[in-house]
Image: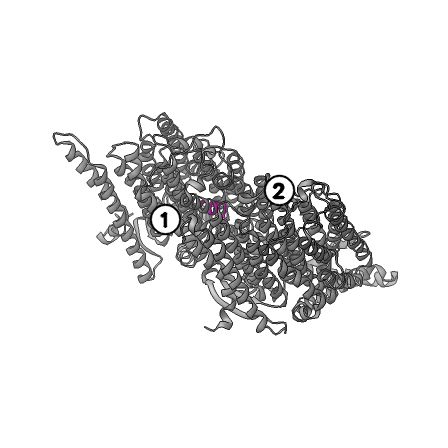
Amino acid sequence: MSQPVITLQQISYLGPVLVIVLTVLVLLMTDVICRLRPSRQGLSLLTGFGVALGGSIVALVYSIFLWHRLTVLKVGKLAELFPVNGPPRSVSAMETSPVWSSGTLVVDYFAVFVCLLVCGVLILVCFNFKPYLRINKLHRSELFPLLLLSASGMMLLSMSRDLLSTFISIEIVSLPLYVLCGLNERSRANQESSLKYFLLGAFGSGFFIYGASLVYGAVGHMNYAAIAYFAKHSLESSSILMIGLALVGAGLAFKLALVPFHAWVPDVYQGAPTPVTAFMAAGVKLAVFAAALRLVLEAFPLMDLSFWRGSISLLAALSMVVGNLLALHQMSAKRLLAYSAIAHTGYIAVGLASGLSTSATSILIYLVGYALAGLGAFTLISYLAPDGQDDIYLDEMHELSKRAPVSALAFAILMLSMAGFPLTLGFVGKLMVFSDAWRAGLYGLVIFAVLNSVISVYYYLRFILAMYMQPKAPGAAELVLKRMPGTYILTGIITVVLTLLLGVIPHMLIAWAQSCQLAGL
Amino acid sequence: MTLEANILSIVTFLPLVGALILLILPNTEEYKSGFRWGALAFSIATFIASLFLLLGFQANGNLHFVMQIPWIPAINAEYYMGVDGISLWLVLLNTFLFPLAILSSIGVIKTREKMYYVLMLVLETAVTGVFLAQDLLLFYFFWEAVLIPMYFLIGVWGGKNKLYATTKFVLFTMVGSLLMLVAIIALYLQSGAINVLSGPTFSLAKLMALDLPPQFQFWCFLAFALAFAIKVPLFPFHTWLPDAHTEAPTAGSIILAGVLLKMGTYGFIRFALPLFPDAAFYRLGGDFFNFTIRDLIMALAVIGIIYGALVAAVQIDVKRLVAYSSIAHLGFVMLGLMSFNQQAVDGAILQMVNHGISTGALFMLVGFIYDRRHTRLIADFGGIAKPMPVYFNFFLVIMLSSVGLPALNGFAGEFPILLGSFQVNWLMTLIATLGVILAAVYLLYMFRRVFFGEVTHPENKTLADLVPREVWSVLPLAVMTFVIGLFPTMFFGKITPDSHVVLTRMQAAETASDEALISRERPRELPPDEVADLLASRAEGGAR
């Protein structure tokens, strides 16, 4: 194998990631420099926020620029970085000419679109953090670098075409998040959340890396193209490869919180600082699903269909039913949304199980809808939550529509979007995902998913019931409504308006997402 | 852009514009009357706009005032609106009932008035859209959009048990409509598989042109029919209705009974039957006892007629009685629709309008008395004809129209239904006719106990008669019962050409299914020697 040459131009296609990493470095360095002063105060909150926001916006603009390049050049991908090639060792040692070639990282429509979305999520989460830190009197200057670092991992994840780079990206996403969950050292819930997330996350990573090593043993490569090639050309089906891929899948399922790998979700979501929960719900889910999509659509299609489709369908069905049933009677808003997140993972996995080339399109649309609704809902929860607490309870929300009509309306719209009512983006996502699964012939699974969304309607309506219809419960504490911070208002407006606008006129979004197809069946 | 092309969009979205305007007004005391009269003004303006539909409408079996522009080109969804004879009267009924419902709730609704009137206007837009959409996805959007305002109307301004009732209402409807969504997806993908060149479509006209396999039609029909049967409601799916009606505020009940239930029957005649004509004649059961889907639905409709009437007869609450009578009345509509006979179908379509008017008016009248006494129990009244003569007269007219007295509208609808369905299935029609008698029994019995005799409760002696606002809200309905009752041909004339199109389709499917049945049975009638020949020739073919 010749030494791959990396040109400056190819590096420039990693721009969004590089911009974010550069911002992280700038933030860390200036923080250190600030601490050298006699006052030993770190970087001020406002400066940190400003730089982080600036970096995210530059990365967003850079991603738009890359998207523009893609459409102008009329190519499927801009670059394949760190290419590897060759015949898989195990097939034939005699063969010398390379029969496949693939980059470890690839910058294509899919990756750029995910980068765009990650930047969008990042900006909204930054908006969330600014008032959150002020209200909770947390002067942690390391917060924004950690947040951005995690986001850079998300971007890399969407480009990874190799089990190793996927693994590294997942770790880049996760490690900062473990710290972020325990942001507030005074809050026991934060600490608990952080520790649980770390332990179970490490467990999941262990699965992944062990599976990857088995795959390497079977195929001789970790590249998805190699796996696909091996699956097609190897004479006998390799049980080592299957076990390896199953373990890799389990590792991803841990990160995605598919049942039965979901046990960490409720405690971590509830205990983490609310903006971090929002970031996990919107960002991590997006990025890990991007990785799962690449793996399934690029490495699996030539494999035994019943093996991977069957297992993903099973996980999807379990996630939907367990998530929905456990969400039914939760009283804590964040815990309810955590269980509903499990159910949503199930719906998205239905799309993953269909494994069509269009699945990437529909899942991305679903994820946009879910990210918007999740970000908006968690923003409103952190606004409504009493000072020093991270959560609200449903019986505290009674009569909220009279005291805070606009927030209540926004919350209701976001819940309807999560429930998948038409006129909201949540419906468009469900429509696309289910129609893909139907096209793939997963009739039973689609009907099961649809009946599950009826269950979910019940608990989403409980929020509306509480805010609009139930009289105040006699013993319940009353929420103290403060003036709403400007950035919360901005986040709320952006999420609600986009949810409705893209729900009624989804053409542009669908057309963009349609360029993001991956290989698939 | 002419008025001709935009009139349907105006009729549909004018109330929504009104709702948005009301929404941005500040919610303070001095704007309170602004909300009331603003909502009324917008709904009246919508009604006037909808009258233009009547002016330019020539019944000829085509869609009128069609507006067809791309909506989501990426998935071939269109903003495709059109009106024909089947939907014309329902749209007019809708725009006619809303101003009256809003007028009847002015002053009655005392809490959160802004939200109430905004929701009423949003609801009007959604319902009109349901009747006009010619694209399945667009239809589904409006169909689900109806749910949300109604959910709030029952849940916020409802009675004691409102939370239970409204949640039940939404969940019941959602089960049906989400399965319908699956069927829409399946149909959409199927159309793409058949017409590879033009791609998948949601457009009703294009989907109707497809030649779908019978098994596929059967399952899709079941999904559509479930959604519509829950909405109608057909007999075993009706349990949400009495709760929703009893707990809903008066205007909510008027709209719910008046137009929302019609979405179900309309769905059958517009979507479920024409899209899947063969499914209606799909045979279930074994060799000895089999029946078609159509028989099944007719039977459920007849059970609904008798069941609704019997349960209504023993109600002690007037509103609940009217709610159960709705189940019976809608049973007639379904019976007529499933007869696939010109008279019966036309009667059924007219009966949808009639039921909207008379049951809407009944709910309104029950609401008037409830506002005065805060009770709806029959036992709490008695002899109130004396203190409330105007009320008594209105109630009499509306009640008789609901009973089906000739010269009033109920008769003009029910009679053709029975006449037509008798030619198709005399036994079921016979049983259904019993329902007409039962309707007279329970309504007259209730009427006697409420209005005649001595005033038994002293607080009823001083009941105030209807105020002008109330008279104005019920008078147009009472007038319409006479208009439809005396000049039904005026209405039938616009319905027939369009219902005929659907009917031809259904009758063709019926003929095809009969032929299939005969050809399936024929081998059994073959004489033994011919069978032997047949077997021999088959064996030969197999050997070769």
* Callout 1 amino acid: Ile
Residue A361 vs A184, above or below: the answer is below
For disc 1, the marked residue is A493
Residue A306 vs B414, above or below: the answer is above
Q: Quadrant where the C terminus of chain B lies?
A: bottom right
Q: Position of residue A451 (x, y in %)?
A: 57, 44
The image's mark for residue B374 is 2
Give the letter of the chain under mark 1: A
Q: Quadrant where the N terminus of chain B lies?
A: bottom left
Q: Residue at x 58, y 61 (%)?
A: B96
Region of the chain picked out in magenta, as a range? A414-420
Indicate yes or no whether the magenta region holds residue B490: no
Indicate yes or no whether the magenta region holds residue A417: yes
* Callout 2 amino acid: His
Give the letter of the chain under mark 2: B
Figure label count: 2
